[in-house]
Amino acid sequence: MDTSKKPELSVIVVISSDTTKSRADTVLLEVCLKALSDQAGPPATEIIVPYHAAVDGIEGLRKAFPDVVFVQAFELSSFTGKGGSREHHDELRSVGLAVARGDVIGLLEDQAIPDEHWCARAVEIQNSEFSVVGGAVENGVDSILNWAVYFCDFSRYQNPLPCGESGFASDSNSAYKMSALQSVRHLWADSFHETLVNSALMERGERIALRPDLVAYQNRRGLSLGSAVRERLVWGRSYAATRCLLLGSKRFAYALLTPILPMLMAFRLTVNVAKRRRGIRKCLEAFPVILLLLSAWALGEMMGYLTAETD
């Protein structure tokens, strides 16, 4: 990977596997960085890893990947220093963006393994009419729990992903033109929220597309049922607490509706899988765990609406 000149592509990798932990480790990050270092025919690329103080193993990775830019974030307003928090992930993306030099910004998480052509395909956005390209996410660990988590997270990003214009893209696997991001810099300078940024870009006339050959594999090795359930609680509560800023007193009505969420979300998830005509058997096998995870999300969402707090 050529790091001797100004990069065409800046890849920001956020450690997001610390949602339920007081400290994060770099076990999954190492696999992700190895995949990025072994890309086939990559453009001039810089890899940026923003991290907080409660991460173990960074010094070892500095030695193993000397070309990677590790940026410690010293002031994260949403980092609690304990398990059960996720808002700091959005702040870390902003920390990475602040130092990125590429014309194209790629976004990945530590628990993703990018396809060997990921960098080459991400940078192709420069010559397209789109400002944002979201990629496909596939499951990389064949266990019932991993399939359940995968379908809850990424069923609508499973291949065959519809190719072409879209109203959404996941910050777990996407590429942005830096020029487009700079036009809405005020929205992500402190914290990068994909829905807010993407909506603002579309309001400005920018276009988003999905691309099935921009592939990353979800690598949730070592996942336990307990941590997966707790993670859903945290994410559901965080989602609702964020929405409370717009809902006002309506949040209590939304809290009353949360009991129907598991079945509604399960229906949408099942429709997504059926449309792809892939993974149907895996989805059926994992369905009891899927319902458990969705129920945990709904409970977290109810708590978020009632308290308007993330923890």
Image: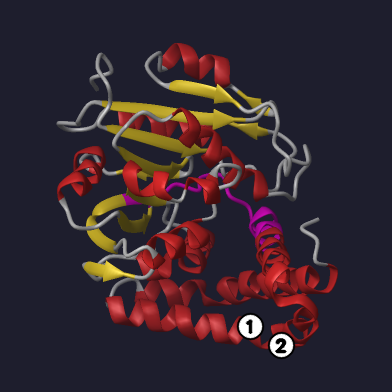
- Point out the residue furthest to the right here: 307
Q: Which residue is mark 2?
A: 257
Q: Amino acid at mark 2?
A: Leu
**Label tally:** 2
Q: Residue at x 39, y 70 (%)?
A: 156
Quadrant of residue 121 within the rendered picture: top left
Q: Is residue 43 above or below residue 307?
A: above
Q: Is residue 48 left or right of residue 189?
A: left
Quadrant assignment for the N terminus: top left
Q: Is residue 257 left or right of residue 90?
A: right
Residue 233 at x, y = what percent? Answer: 71, 63
Q: Which residue is mark 1?
A: 261
Residue 246 at x, y = what percent? Answer: 68, 72
Foreground of the two, 134 or 276: 134
Q: Residue at x 28, y 28 (%)?
A: 45
Q: Is residue 177 visible?
A: no
Quadrant assignment for the C terminus: bottom right
Residue 28 at x, y = what percent? Answer: 49, 36
Q: Is residue 12 left or right of residue 25?
A: left
Q: Residue at x 21, y 68 (%)?
A: 164
Mark 1 is surrounded, within 10 Å at the Cα level, by few (under 14), some (14 to 19) or many (20 or more) other residues, namely some
Q: Residue at x 42, y 56 (%)?
A: 142
Q: Secondary structure at mark 2?
A: helix
Magenta segment boundaries in residue numbering: 216-232
